[in-house]
Amino acid sequence: MLFSLSLCVISFVFLMTGGMFCLAHGVYFLNQDYTLFLEWELVNLNGVPIVMTILFDWMSLIFMSLVLLISSLVIYYSKEYMGADFNMNRFILLVLAFVLSMMFLIISPNLISILLGWDGLGLVSYCLVIYYQNVKSYNAGMLTALSNRIGDVALLMAIAWMLNYGSFNYIYYLEVMKGDFPMAVIGWLVLLAAMTKSAQIPFSAWLPAAMAAPTPVSALVHSSTLVTAGVYLLIRFSPLLEGTEAFKFLMLISGLTMFMAGLGANFEFDLKKIIALSTLSQLGLMMCILSMGLYKLAYFHLLAHALFKALLFMCAGAVIHNMKDSQDIRNMGSLISQMPYTVGCLTVANLALCGMPFLAGFYSKDLILEVVCMSPSNMFIFLLYFVSTGLTVCYTARLVYYSLSGVPNLPNCHPMTDESYNMFVGMTGLMVMSVLGGSMLSWWLFPNPTMICLPLGLKTLAISVSLLGAWLGYEAAKFSLGMRVKTLSNFTLVNFLGSMWFMPSLFTLGVSKLPLEVSYNLTKSGDQGWSELFGGQGLYQSFVGSSQISQFLHQNELKLFLLGFTSWFTLLLIMLVVL
């Protein structure tokens, strides 16, 4: 146990130091507009150099610093959360492998080395999702791994298409070869890969399923690693895809993802799945604003979202830990009087998610919505943005109503406490970052203020939609309490909206059921049926029968001879007597 604790502390100190170092250099690179492109020759085979390329610019360094800072706090938090686990060392090493894979992906301007990080994320995420070894975790892990394999294949095909250019460093060709057909194909393939990793429709089913992983892993996955990898890759490829049909397609898909996830979260009762659907909604928002060509704004929201989403999962983990592993929000209630500090952190994270002024989410979300008001997009996309924002506040208000307020829904003797030092340190660090991070990032990324001039109605539309969403969430939560939940759950529309538009069924059982049935019937009637009868087994049985007859004749030839002779002699005597 001492070694596992020391491993936590060593990892925490190492990652925190690395994060602060990267942050300082990232801000310096941003101010100086400085980029460092390193080529490290690993080996030279017969004059063919194998080179590892590394790109350090403000974007990679600031993102890397955030990944390192969040993962350091998550590991320190895990010291107590996973304290009773016998395999603590294995868990910490898996998390470190996860962070290392993300580092590879962030600093690579080369599709080959990106694939190392991309596949590393997929493999380690599978290991972490099946960490609690049961059937549900295995199913979730397999769904996660197979969904991400589609993106891996797309990336491999993009690498094959890059052979046309003589180098795998895509960063050289994004703007120069923009109108070229092979580069357009590579753009579409990278878009497909990013859609699978960031769980856009129709690949959204794996994201809530991946909640089978331990909560610290969820905090890391949903804030700054796995799901953000697709967004980050598209930010890198945005000069190639800007203004193309691929980005128009992405705008529609990501807008629908944002709307679908916000709607689904309002019908969900599992605490972790509500936050997972919230992540899916925010990923849709990032992708949607990125498809408009505003990559810097998408990057800003990516960083701001990472801060409060990690805090949200940590607080949820503390609540679940105290609830003796119950995740149903209907079993919670009046947590504010029993866990005041945790609930305070949770409220800060929720308000940041809703875009409460002067918290991290406000600076990015409000700016995004105001830019959307000024952009030449159509009414459908405009409605998707604002309705999804209202739905975000709606499910947050519902979550607050169920879990934090009201009366306790637990047994009277259920002990709940806030006394957990290590979890406090992790949550406090992220709470400070959630309060201060948005303004600091906006000063760094947008040092020159831009004038946004809108009429009063559009200027106040974001806050109006948020207030309306909060009221609707409160009313919906009150209405769905009690026996009416059973009545509501019988409606097909509620089932459709609450199950992510039947996506988990359609893209798991829907894809595999018919091929599995056909292959089963073919196997049963073919391999195990007629082909057995007229093939190997039938031939074998006929040979067995004839060899048994032959063996019988061979072993009993004297008896058969005597029997035959006696029969013939008897028959001869009878004929003589008759005649």
Image: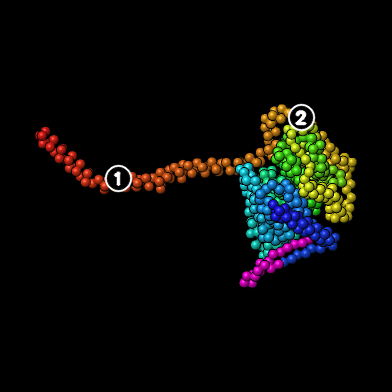
Q: Can residue 202 be seen in this view?
A: no
User: Which one is in front, 454 or 106?
Assistant: 106
Residue 372, position in %: x, y?
82, 46
Most prominent secondary structure in the magenta stretch?
strand
Q: Residues within 10 Å of mark 2 (few under 14, many from 20)?
A: few
Residue position marked by numbered label 2 in the rendering: 479
What kind of element bears circle 2? helix
Q: Which amino acid does label 1 sit on?
A: Ile
State the extent of the magenta-drawn residues as a range.
40-59
Residue position marked by numbered label 1 in the rendering: 549
Q: Which amino acid does label 2 sit on?
A: Phe
Q: Residue at x 70, y 28 (%)?
A: 487
User: Which one is in front, 497 or 384?
Assistant: 497
Quarter placement of the C terminus: top left
Callout count: 2
Q: Residue at x 79, y 63 (%)?
A: 35
| In magenta segment, residue 161 | no
User: Which one is in front, 365 or 337?
Assistant: 337
Residue 399, position in %: x, y?
77, 37
Q: Earlier in the sequence, mark 1 or mark 2?
A: 2
